[in-house]
Image (cartoon, rainbow, N blue to C red):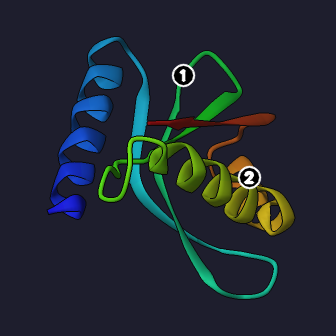
Amino acid sequence: MRNNRHHKIRSEIASTLKAVGYNVHEELYGLSNNGSSRRVDILAFKNNSRIGFIIDPTVRFECSSDQPIYVDREKKSTVYSIRAHHFLLQYLEKYNLSKITVTGLM
């Protein structure tokens, strides 16, 4: 049920971004520095800009109302910091971007 909620919200965000003129790619695969495979929920950018945005929604409320804060913080610091360099470079090159900003949404 949690995955279904996540995918529905991700799709709604992606549709909204497309409607306002962004190029949007969902569920992009890549490799981290240690060789493990990773997925980016949404990569969005405008044609006339070289700045991209990774949007990573977190949809969790199973244990407590504070759980999304901790999960979001842990996931973003683990996936997008230590192992991010090689992971994000793939998208910079592939989509001709100069910068990617990571945004976690709860």
- Residue sitting at x 72%, y 56%: 80
Q: Amino acid at mark 1?
A: Asn
**Residue nearer the viewer, 101 or 24:** 101
Left-right relation of 5 to 65: left
Element assignment for label 2:
helix
As displayed, is residue 81 above or below residue 52? below
Q: Nearer the viewer, residue 9 or 100?
A: 9
Is residue 23 shown to the viewer in this render? Answer: yes
- Check residue 93 in the rendering and tell me which mark sits there, or answer none: 2
How far separated are the C-alphas under marks 1 and 2? Answer: 15 Å
Left or right of 21? Residue 78 is right
User: Residue flagged by tag 2: what amino acid is it?
Assistant: Glu
| Mark 1 vs 2, N-terminal side | 1
Residue 98, image x, y percentages: 81, 34
Tell me the quarter of the image containing the N terminus. bottom left
Residue at 29% in and 58% down:
62
Horizontal relation, residue 82 to residue 55: left or right: right
Instruction: Please state which of residues 106 and 70 is positioned toward the viewer in this rendering.
Output: 70
Q: Quadrant of the C terminus?
A: top left
Looking at the image, which residue sits at the far front?
Answer: 64
Marks counted in the figure total 2
- Give the percent coordinates (x, y) of residue 56: 49, 45
Q: Which residue is mark 1?
A: 47
Question: Toward the viewer: 80 or 14?
Answer: 80
Asked whether the viewer can see residue 42, the reply is no
